[in-house]
Image (cartoon, rainbow, N blue to C red):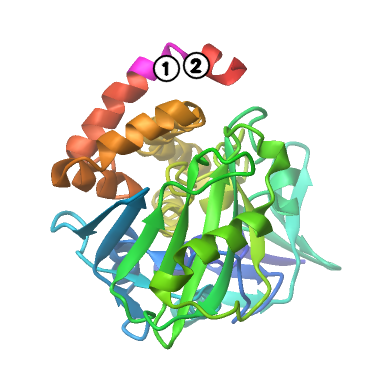
Amino acid sequence: MERCDVAVIGAGPGGAAAATWLARGGADVVVFEKAGRGRDKSCGDGLTPRAIAEIRRLGLDISRFHRIDGLRVQAGRTVREVRWPDGPFPPVGAVAPRAEFDAMVMQAAVDAGAELRERAAAEPLLEGDRVVGVRAGADEVRADLVVIAAGAGSAAARLVGATRVEGSPFGLAIRAYAPSERADDRYMEACLTVEGPDGSIVPGYGWVFPAGDGIVNIGVGALSTMRNFTGLNLNTMLDAYAAQVGVSWQLGPFTDRPRAWRLPMHVGRRSGHGWLAVGDAAGLVNPFNGEGIDYALESGRLAAEAFLELPNTAPARYEAVLAHDYDPFFATARRFAWVIGRPRLLRALLALALSTGFTMELVLDIMANLVDEQHPGLAGRLLDVGGRALAVADPVLVRS
């Protein structure tokens, strides 16, 4: 029977980041990836300044990806552009197709000394309520810690109870690639007034992210808090949105079949005896925008730091960091997800948010994941106040 210090299930951004930092810290790491380098994943492909900060920590060169300088937001006839602010995160973003980006972070883990086993579907190996390693086919690898980085709803996550909290908001999204005459645009574009099947505004947004080389990533996402959510047809919504922006972006036909995915935003367990979850498997997806690459990279690093400092208590210490630094923001975001599920309230909030350049900068901070515990800024403080006010209405929001 083999043995290592840490076994990682999943080599996406979260798992690869954890493996890279662990290996650089001297740990013996084995990473199990059910696909292989260069595999695609349904995603908007956007890298926020927050993600860029983590990528730079890792020492990775992303200059080959298309640079993004800011965000363009549309709501009805109102359109506003805001450049990334100077602050705790670098004022630059990028659009990186996931097949290329994930291959790059996987290679970073290998270069750091981690062993990558491709096309190896793995699951946690349990003894009672403790995870003691990983099983992949007929092979078993014992480990002091198992990092679950296999994504939301994966078999590995379900086996340890890292499943969506029943009744909590979740998102659905769909994306495709299309040729565009504006593929070199330096702004990500988000539309906050996408219509649902009944003609009302959907709590969510449509996006066009220019990837350079003549291609854009186009998609739509919606929250489960909308009316008639069960009647939602993502393909129909995407076609309607593509028609809405087709002229301005000079879009051609989709180059591939649109791909949809589900985004749980609150899981019941993120750690336990001998294991912890990172990225989407830990529910670290921003309910305001469905984005999670930056949180995946950060949580992978935090998991590695917890293990390298004190292996025996890594899961508990990692959980404590998430509870302090991430949970307050995510709890507030989930409460707002219930609020914006009401069309009239959503219209009022959108009118306020896009009314001035000042309010638009606050929207940018939230939409681009630029709010964190160390640097809350005005947007973070306002969200905190609003979240505390909404907390008393939790039972009413969920029930209605």
Q: Secondary structure at mark 1?
A: helix
Q: Which of the two residues, 6 or 17, is positioned nearer the viewer here?
A: 17
Instruction: Answer whether residue 335 is magenta in the image.
Output: no
Q: Is residue 162 above or below residue 39?
A: above
Q: Residue at label 1? A: 391
Q: Please give left or right for residue 352 compared with residue 254 in the image.
A: left
Image location (x, y in percent) of residue 66:
35, 79
Magenta region: 389-393
Q: Quadrant of residue 119?
A: bottom right
Q: Please give the name of the residue rendered at 18% of the width and 54% of the height, measured from the top-left corner.
A: 88
The quadrant of the image that shows the C terminus is: top right
Quadrant including the N terminus: bottom right
> Could you tell me which residue is drawn at 54 percent across and 56 percent down?
220
**In this rendering, would 232 be left or right of 46?**
right
Q: Residue shown at 66%/57% (left/top)?
A: 236
Q: Which mark is residue 394?
A: 2
- Outermost residue, right side: 138
Q: Quadrant of residue 200?
A: top right
Say which amino acid is labelled 1: Ala
Crowd around label 1: few <14 · some 14–19 · many ≥20 (10 Å):
some
* One can see residue 324 in this view: no
Residue 114 in the image: state x and y as whole percent: 53, 74
| Badge number at residue 63 | none
- Between residues 272 and 119, which one lies in front from this camera angle? 119
Q: Is residue 340 above or below residue 355?
A: above
Q: Are marks 1 and 2 in contact (CB under 8 Å)?
A: yes
Question: Tag 2: residue type?
Answer: Asp
